[in-house]
Amino acid sequence: IPGQKVVLITGCSSGIGLRMAVMLAKDEQKRYHVIATMRDLKRKDKLVEAAGDAYGKTLSLAVLDVCNDESVKQCFDGIKDRHVDVLINNAGIGLVGPIESIPIEEMKKVFETNFFGVIRMIKEVMPDMKKRKGGHIIVVSSVMGLQGVVFNDVYAASKFAMEGFCESLAVQLLKFNVTLSLIEPGPVRTEFETKMIEEVKQKECPGADPDTVHYFKNVYLPSSIDIFETLGQTPDDIARVSSHAKVIEASRPRFRNLTNPLYTPIVALKYADETGGLSVHAFYHMLFNLGPLMHISMTVMKYLTCGCLRSRTTTSYLGLKTASKR
Ligand code: NAD
């Protein structure tokens, strides 16, 4: 349909990608045609169900594995004139645990997906966007792309790599009127997270010493679960921020977009002390000295915040609804 923006999203079979695809495809003004991609179309059911009437109209499906040159090329060749207005790089994988117990090959897989996967996509759309002097590239990074987190060493590194790449490229792209935006969610409650936690509990962590394994399983993991339960956002929250006026619809989209305001002080802390000591010691103290206390304060916070978080979510949702009716 003329005037409709073509939006291609990676990793749409679950989580944030699925919700982004659905939210954009269900836009009341039908401003978008969403090409929701995934590695394996056998996993399309949840998306198709959530998309409802939009499926086949403003939402279509395509196969795409960000780690595979041929798959990426084939997907673009299947798009009319290879025209994509908005590329949303969402596909990504996590990795936690003591590095002694993680084979290098597994670490490389994280970089293959989270870093080279995104670059492969950008290289594919960039020439056309430059030629057309327009386009928007969105990358789902993470708060961990700005601040490292214990036992998430390699995952954080892959997101840091992405941040550096985007900071560099954004300047050149601006010359061609192509915009680049990063979305930096804090913890998001996706299925993936619960599955990961269950897996970690079973993990033997071969190669790591007993103390490290103890810190990982009995200190880090419980506090991580607390944080997810207390501060965790939903995939819909992330989709809302991304499709919100600040990112896709903005005439001048912001470059960085932290989705969870509670994380702003953590990032500020990092830049407040150029020696970096403040962050390292604050995180050390939080994990090893305040761990048990944090459990209590998180529980208190959960009760205190759940009411106001709920109302905030509702208002921003209503805000979006009214905005889109105008
Ligand atoms: P998720 O596991 O539900 O979604 C990731 C999707 O990417 C899955 O559908 C998966 O199949 C897909 N994927 C993995 N490898 C792929 C490949 N090679 N090609 C194509 N697709 C592939 O988890 P999510 O939380 O929705 O994650 C989405 C993005 O958000 C990721 O980039 C993740 O790093 C980022 N993120 C997540 C959180 C969180 O707490 N869940 C926080 C910050 C950032």
Image: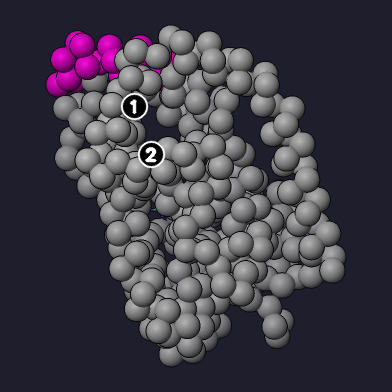
Relative image position of residue 232 (x, y in whole percent)? 56, 33
As drawn, which residue projects farthest toward the bottom? 131
> What residue is shown at x 55% (from left), y 68% (from top)?
253
Figure quadrant of residue 93: top left
The residue wearing badge 2 is: 269
Relative image position of residue 168 (x, y in whole percent)? 31, 68
Q: Is residue 190 left or right of residue 98?
A: right
- 172 is higher (above) or lower (below) than 166: below
Residue 155 part of the magenta-drawn span: no
Is the C terminus in the top left, top right, bottom left or bottom right quadrant? bottom right
**Taking the image as drawn, is residue 226 in sight?**
yes
> What residue is shown at x 76% (from left), y 49% (from top)?
317
> What residue is shown at x 30% (from left), y 63% (from top)?
165
Label of residue 7 in the image: none
The residue wearing badge 1 is: 282
- 160 is higher (above) or lower (below) than 155: below
- 299 is higher (above) or lower (below) than 92: above
Relative image position of residue 88 (x, y in whole percent)? 50, 63
Q: Tag 2, which secondary structure? A: helix
Q: Residues within 10 Å of mark 1 (few under 14, many from 20)?
A: few
Q: Amino acid at mark 1?
A: Ala
Q: Amino acid at mark 2?
A: Leu
Instruction: Classify mark 2 as within 8 Å of ligand 1 or not, answering yes or no.
Output: no
Magenta residue span: 206-222
Q: Are marks 2 and 1 in contact (CB under 8 Å)?
A: yes
Q: Is residue 243 left or right of residue 30?
A: left
Instruction: Classify mark 1 as within 8 Å of ligand 1 or not, answering yes or no.
Output: no
Q: Is residue 136 left or right of residue 104?
A: right
**Taking the image as drawn, is residue 89 in sight?**
no
